[in-house]
Image (tube, rainbow, N blue to C red):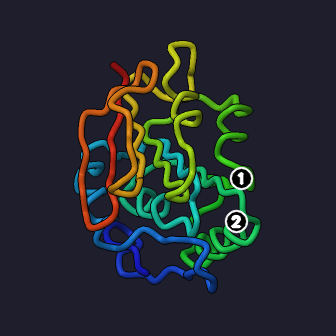
Amino acid sequence: MRVIAGIYRGRTLKSPADTRTRPTSDRLRETLFNVLSPRIDETTRFLDLCAGTGAIGIEALSRGAEFATFVDRSRRACALIEDNLEHLSIPEGSTEVVCLPAETYTARTFQAGWDIVYFDPPYDHEYSHVLFEFGTSESSLLNEDGLVVVEHHSKAAMPDAVGILRRWRILKQGESNLSFFERN
């Protein structure tokens, strides 16, 4: 697994030794960032939920995002993310690694103003309650023009709307889909 573009382009990332973590393929990451790149600049705050190896958030940082938070429930995954951040010498202060389930993090966090949220739960995971945290009109987790992207299995039913979030695009690649949500 490698960083596709930006300042860390071509650098390799450590992968998990077990098969419990399903890293997003290089090809799917490239497709994702073809859509996201115009939205990423030096002020972008990126949230990587169910981060696994951290490859998605690291790609966002490599392409110029100001800050990335990596959230995963697995202590092993959090250690792997920290190893990858250290391996790439990503500056301190531009990242945060939180070892909590995504639903706990989104329910408890008081941080506001995410520009891009990437949510890649296990394919058998129920996701709607996590999306709802971003889709309430009272929520300050997502900026007004923010975007939530959910990676899910191509056979999984995904709603067209969750609260005030509306799906505006879906990309299909093999058994994986990317659903893009914005505020209505």
Q: Residue at x 49, y 49 (%)?
A: 119
Extreme residue in the top direction = 138
Indicate whether 164 appears above or below 49.
above
Three-letter amino acid code at the position of disc 2: Cys
Helix or strand or loop: what does disc 2 sit on?
helix
Marks 1 and 2, Cα distance to the nearest angstrom?
A: 7 Å
Question: Quick check: marks 1 and 2 in contact, CB under 8 Å?
Answer: yes
Left of 80 or right of it: where is 170? Answer: left
Kindly identify which numbered label has been placed on residue 19: none
The image shows residue 35, relative to residue 141, as above or below, that is: below
Of residues 47 and 74, the one nearer the viewer is 74
Q: Residue at coordinates 39% horizontally, 54% vertically from top-left?
A: 64
Q: In which quadrant will I find the C terminus?
A: top left
Residue at (76, 66) in percent of width and height:
75
Which of the 4 image quarters holds residue 132? top right
Q: Is residue 22 above or below residue 91?
A: below
The quarter of the displayed image where residue 28 is located: bottom left
Residue 41 x, y percent position in the rendering? 35, 46
Residue 101 position in % (x across, y down): 70, 49
Indicate the amino acid at tag 1: Val
What residue is shown with label 1? Answer: 98
In x, y percent, where is residue 76? 73, 72
